[in-house]
Image (tube, rainbow, N blue to C red):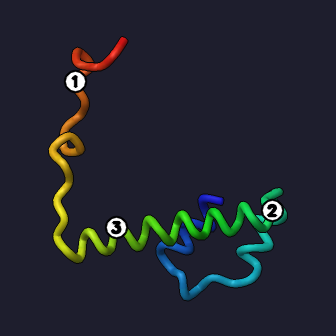
Amino acid sequence: MLDYVLKLTREPWAMRSGDVEALRGAGFEDTAILDIAQVAAYFGFVNRLADGLGVELEPYWSSPPDPSTQDG
C-alpha cells in the first residue's frame, strides 16, 4: 500500500493497472483501494493548495508538545 501511495504521489503519470493488481494481490478489496487513492490524492491536493497559497502552520505544529501540559 505504501509503495502504491508513494508512486501515486511522486509519479502519478507512471501508474499502471499492475499497481492496482498488486494491491488486490495483497488482499485489498476495490473499495479499500479507492479509499487509499482518495486519501493520497486529497492530502496531495491540500498540501499543494496550502503550499501554493503560502499557508503557515499553526504555532503548535512547529514545536514538540510539552508533556507537562498533557493529560495523564
Write down the quadrant of residue 67 in the picture: top left
Separation of marks 2 and 1 at Cα, in angstroms: 41 Å
The residue under the point 78% across, 59% down is 28
Comes first in the chain, label 3 or label 2: 2
Separation of marks 3 and 2 at Cα, in angstroms: 27 Å
Mark seen at residue 66 = 1
Mark seen at residue 29 = 2
Mark seen at residue 44 = none
Residues 5 and 39: in front is: 39
Name the residue tied to disc 3: 47
Q: Amino acid at mark 3?
A: Asn
- Above or below, 50 against 11 in this view is above
The residue under the point 22% across, 24% down is 66
Estimate the x, y position of residue 55 in percent, counting from the top left. 19, 65
Write down the quadrant of residue 34 in the picture: bottom right
Write down the quadrant of residue 37 in the picture: bottom right
Residues 12 and 50: in front is: 50
Residues 65 and 72: in front is: 72
Separation of marks 1 and 3 at Cα, in angstroms: 26 Å
Comes first in the chain, label 2 or label 1: 2
Local crowd size for mark 2, using a 10 Å CA cut-off: few (<14), some (14–19), many (≥20): few
Estimate the x, y position of residue 48 in percent, counting from the top left. 33, 73
Would you say 23 lies left or right of 12 here? right
Would you say 54 lies left or right of 9 here? left
The residue under the point 47% across, 75% down is 10
Q: Amino acid at mark 1?
A: Asp
Local crowd size for mark 3, using a 10 Å CA cut-off: few (<14), some (14–19), many (≥20): few
